Amino acid sequence: MIINNNIQAAASLYNRTWSNGSKNRAGEYSRAQASDEVVLSSNAKTFSNALRDLRANAESDGVRMDKVEKFTALIESGCYHIDSEKLAESIMNYKF
């Protein structure tokens, strides 16, 4: 196959064919390309709404930030230890 510098011409033709508002080979105008969009599922919307409500109501729902900060500091310092047997017993009593 012999290529004789027609690459630019072919690329130009291709670009004209697919650009907005240009005529295609049949002489018809091509329609404008649709833009990208993000569509969330109903589950994602529900989760997003719940998360937004939780964040908005964190202060009014009785969250005691002093306790949260206290336990956060204990966990980060490595001083907070959980009795695994007591935890397992509590879970079993709650579940059954």
Image (tube, rainbow, N blue to C red):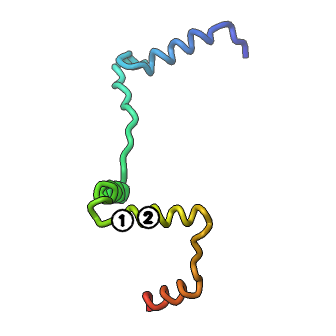
Q: Is residue 1 left or right of residue 23?
A: right
Residue with the most extreme left position: 60
Which SS class for mark 1? loop
Q: Which residue is mark 2?
A: 68
Residue 79 visible in the shown view: yes
For badge 1, the amino acid type reads: Arg
Disc sitting over residue 64 in the figure:
1
Quadrant in which residue 43 is drawn? bottom left
Q: CA distance from mark 2 to mark 1?
A: 6 Å
Residue with the most extreme right position: 1
Residue 84, relative to residue 35: is it above or below?
below
For badge 2, the amino acid type reads: Val
Residue beneath the point at 37% across and 56% down: 44
Residue beneath the point at 56% across and 9% down: 9
Query: Residue 1, how many percent across, how many down?
Result: 73, 17
Disc sitting over residue 17 in the figure:
none
Q: Nearer the viewer, residue 35 or 47?
A: 47
Residue beneath the point at 30% across and 66% down: 62
Q: Are marks 2 and 1 in contact (CB under 8 Å)?
A: yes
Q: Nearer the viewer, residue 37 or 61?
A: 61
Query: Residue 6, how many percent across, how many down?
Result: 62, 9
Q: Is residue 79 left or right of residue 26?
A: right
Residue beneath the point at 62% across and 66% down: 78
**How many marks can you see?**
2
Which SS class for mark 2? helix
